[in-house]
Amino acid sequence: MTVDRGLVDWVAEAMAPLGLVTRRRMMGGAAVYLDGVIFALVTGDGALWFKSDAAADATWDAAGCERFRYARAGNTASINYRRAPEEVHDDADAMREWAMLGVAAGRRAAG
């Protein structure tokens, strides 16, 4: 699988008013950063995931956003990223609102 460049470009376009968006290839997808802070992943299957943490999990849970899960050594493991709500794919304001939860989690993790 390869990263969906259109999705990465859309994230960058929507987030541009808030800072510099960069990406780094990662495991068939891309890690997405705002001003050097990781806030999202775009996976090889074209899914967008925003970073989360204990401070933001309740918001993601209330919106029904599933946790990122993957198979590992015959088990299922997870990392603290949440699937982006559908509205972020065509609404820049929604993209910024949800992505900023990821940016905040990224900043807390870095601090």
Image (cartoon, grey):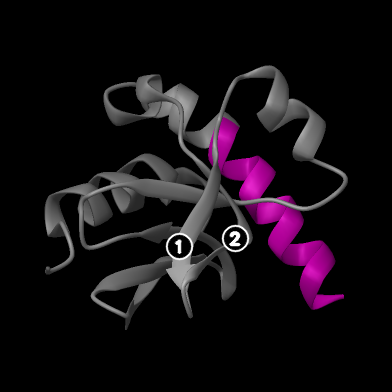
Specify the quadrant that holds the C terminus: bottom right
Residue 20: give x, y in percent of width and height: 45, 64
- Label 2 neighbour load within 10 Å: few <14, some 14-19, many 20+: few
Quarter of the image where one finds residue 43: bottom left
Q: Nearer the viewer, residue 79 or 26?
A: 79
* Kind of element beneath mark 1: strand
Residue 24: give x, y in percent of width and height: 35, 80
Residue 48: give x, y in percent of width and height: 37, 47
Q: Residue 36: within the magenta?
A: no
| Residue on which disc 1 sits | 70
Quarter of the image where one finds residue 10: top left
Label the magenta part by its dominant secondary structure. Answer: helix
* Kind of element beneath mark 2: strand
Residue contact between numbered discs 2 and 1, judged by CB atoms under 8 Å: yes
| Residue on which disc 2 sits | 78
Please name the amino acid that badge 1 sits on. Tyr
